[in-house]
Every structure is written in C-alpha cells, then in structure tokens.
Image (cartoon, rainbow, N blue to C red):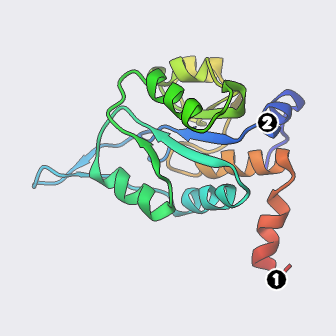
Amino acid sequence: MQTIPEEVRKRAARIKMVVFDVDGVLTDGSLLYGDDGLEYKAFNSRDGHGMKMLMATGVGIAIITGRSSPTVMYRMTGLGITDVYQGQHDKRPAFEKLLKKHTLRSEQAAYVGDDVVDLSVMLQCGLAVATGDAHRLVQQHAHWSTPSAGGRGAARDVCEMIMTAQGTLQAQFDKYLGG
C-alpha cells in the first residue's frame, strides 16, 4: 500500500460509508454485449473481497451508477450490498437519499468515481477518490487516486486505505493468519 497523505488519512478516518460507481470503477469500463443483446460485466474478485472486509469493520457500502443492469444487482446481492441505485444520470439525489437513510453527514461518506458524471457527488462528499485511470478532471478534483485502475483492484485499494486509516486492516488480515 502506498503512503497515505495525512489529509487523506484524516478524511478516511471519518468515513462510515463508501459509495462506488460501477462502470470504470468496479469494472474496467468495457461494455460487453452478447448476440442475445444481454450486457455482460467482469468484476474483480479481490475488489469484492476488499468490500466484504470493509463491511465487516462496520463501514457501509453503496452503489450509485448511471446505467441499469441485472448483472450489477446479481453481483451486489452476492456481496451483501443492499443500497444499490441504478439508472442515476444525476447521482446527487441518490447520494442525498443515502445520507438521509443512514443518518450520515456528507463528510462521513466517500465516493469512488472515474468519469465526469461522478464529479457532482465527489464534490459533496468527505473523501473523493478517483481510480488510477480516471478522467483527468476527476483526478484533479479527487482527494486521493488509487494505484490501480478501475476493475483491476481500485476498489480493493480504497477499502484497504480506509481500513488502514481507521486502524482495522490488520485485524481483517489476522482472520486469515489464524490471529
């Protein structure tokens, strides 16, 4: 894990919920269609496990995505993520609903995005994170950028960074080390 700047560490220590975009964040951004017209997505299993470890520490996870896909719901259900907002072309209303539903202040929420459609929420949250391959404008407005690209470990980077800042990462690792 790369060194976390002190300002980012302070922001990450306050996070109680992480909101992820899907295409370009939890996937590499490719849109795959079969001859049957169905959409297919590839998710990184290590990203998913990082999300499960973060949830085990008490930090919530939500999804706000501009597209709608049954594949997203299938994957999120498998991870135990119930706050899923699809078809959100303007992501701000869904973000505000999440904050209200979970009685959170905006500084207690992180948002992970990769493209300009994510900026409206990134500019409101307490910790704005860009994937390593995010659009330059998104990178410019992020508090932190992941070492990894979207769909290639970016979500795991975020989860481990937040757990590091909150002092919970080693306890998660210890579960696998017999500790």
The correct choice, above or below, for 174 with respect to 115 in the image is: below
Q: Quadrant of residue 148?
A: top right
Measured as percent of width and height from the top left, residue 33 is found at 20, 49
Q: Nearer the viewer, residue 16 or 128?
A: 16
Image point 85% across, 27% down: which residue?
7
Relative placement, left or right, of 79 versus 126 is left
User: Could one spot residue 127 in this view of the protein?
Assistant: yes
Residue 100 rendering spot, x and y as whole percentages: 57, 30
Callout 2 secondary element: loop
99 sits to left or right of 31: right
Foreground: 88 or 49? 88
Residue extending farthest left: 36
Q: Does 151 sit left or right of 53 as displayed?
A: left
Percent of width and height locating residue 146: 66, 39
Above or below residue 178? Residue 50 is above
Residue lying at the far bottom in this picture: please name it: 178
Amino acid tagged 2: Arg
Label pair 1/2, CB-CB below 8 angstroms:
no
Badge 1 marks a residue whose secondary structure is loop
Q: Is residue 28 visible?
A: no
Q: Which residue is mark 1?
A: 178
Q: Quarter of the image holding residue 35? A: bottom left
On residue 57, the disc is: none
Q: Amino acid at mark 1?
A: Gly
First of labels 1, 2 by sequence position = 2
Mark 1 or 2, which is nearer the eye?
Answer: 2
Residue under the image location 66 percent in, 24 percent down: 142
Q: Which residue is mark 2?
A: 14
